[in-house]
Image: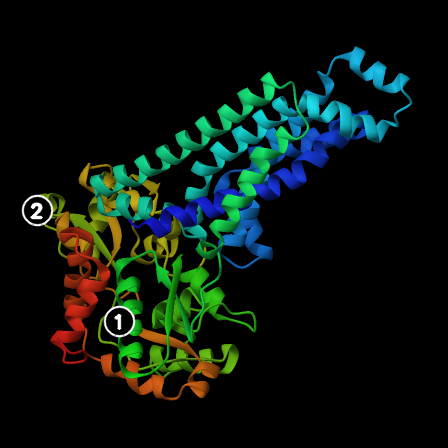
Amino acid sequence: MSWSLVFEHLFIVLAAAILSIAAGLPLGIWAYVSPRARGVILHVVDLLQTIPSLALLGIIMVVLDPGKLTVIIGITLYSLLPIVRNTCLGLQEVDSGVKEAARGMGMSKPYRTLMVEFPLAFPTVFTGIRIAVVNAIGSAVFAAYVGGGGLGTVITQAIRVKDMKLLLTATAALMVIAVALDLLMGWFETQMRRSRGGSRKMWVPVAAILLAFCLLLPFGRGGTGDLMLYDGDYSETQLMHHMVKMLVEDRTDLTVTIQDQMSQVNNFNALTGSGHTCDLMISYDGTLLTTFFHQDVTDVPEGMSLYDYVNQVAQEEYGMRLLEKLGFDNTYAVAVPQAVADRYGLETVSDLIPIADQLTFGAEQGFFTREGSMKYYPFVEFYGLEFRDKISVDLGLKYTAIESGSFDVTVVYATDGLNRKVGLKILEDDKSFFPDYNGAFLVREDVLEQHPELEGILNQLAGRISTEQMAELTYQVDVVGRTVDDVAREFLVSQGLLAG
């Protein structure tokens, strides 16, 4: 965990706070002055609060690309409720005698609302702002799911690899930020209540938020560089992207920027179209076929390899190209704890057929979706498996659930170092349900035209990383606890691709 992630998290929170204040105060005032609009406004902000965080971010991503803007807008919408309600409530609670006196002095309704009533109501209004900002600190953790960065990336990684020290450190950082901001804003609130809503003093905390936001702007800007990549939510993706950065910057004058963590699906979406926000990514021929192109192995023309087919489609329809295969096959694999394998004598997936009704299948939510053909329902139908139960868990909790005995059978990636840590036995896919998932760099054609030297540089890795080697590299990161940069550099040095 680094200070840059802490500041990045604060940037997201403060950006959302500024937007929610800018939108929430006018809405709260409108709800106060217009009884007809009040019910609609308050019901809408109430409704926004009921939408699950990830669902709201998913809805926003339909319109916007993944990244910080999606997260900031999502948190802004969540923050409206306390600001709008407290603004309306604070104005309603202003002493009626003060309102009558202002009216008697001939003040217009807009003038007395903004210049007399609002300053008196501001301590209550500020309570809503305080609640919104503190709540946003926790909500910003979900930025990790949509490539928004911040401390959420540390927390999800720590949960996945069961790094309690890292998890507690990140959680403690969030708690310190929340408590510090709450105490500071609480002190401002107390001062304002003592001054009975002084019109000048009420803008001090708002100015402080704006100043802090300006100071944190460098941590919220989009990445700059000749080549743009995203970090992945798996160590494998991170390792390969950091190898790209090391090789390219060692052999050329180009700068490579690795942006926030992002899933494979979101990364592919960020790679496509004229508004792309990255230039290349590590991908897999099987993923391209089933998840991105929504096809099946039966769609591959006879006599043509899966790799060649998806490469052709990528070039013709997306303006991208797969470079040479890197050597590892990160295919799906069905696995069971060694104790379960010993108890039932399991060696192949077909061995599960007669005992499936005694076993529980568990996996991350993504494996139970209908997106792509290499998922749970086509799998059990293909093999004729009828498990006793199926359990969907968060990706970061899957290996913890396996170790605790929550389920007996799961699906893993063949190159995941955590398979070795928790003692899983990989069952042979004896009917060949899962296709190959050969790793290769997927690069935009316009990038290769602009920097033709890239292809030769990146293809130096072709065929050098076996499935077993990749499993060892991810083991070093996820289990041993070494940094991605150290493991990536050590491998490149061992291959003679970087100087020691």
SS of the residue under disc 1? helix
Residue 262 in view (yes/no): no
Of tags 2 and 1, which is closer to the observer? Answer: 1
Q: Is residue 101 above or below residue 392?
A: above
Name the spot of residue 433 as percent of width and height, x first.
30, 64
**From the viewer's perspective, is 326 left or right of 381?**
left
SS of the residue under disc 2? helix
Compare residues 395 and 97 and report the one nearer the observer.
97
Name the spot of residue 105 as percent of width and height, x first.
89, 19
Classify 10 Å Cα crowding around label 2: few (below 14), some (14-19), many (20 and above).
Answer: few
Q: Quadrant of residue 196?
A: top right
Name the spot of residue 417 as percent of width and height, x first.
18, 56
The residue type indicated by label 1 comes to: Met
Q: Which mark is residue 220?
A: none
The residue type indicated by label 2 comes to: Asp
Q: Which mark is residue 342?
A: 2
Q: Please report the residue visible at 27 percent of the width from the left and 73 percent of the height from the top.
A: 246
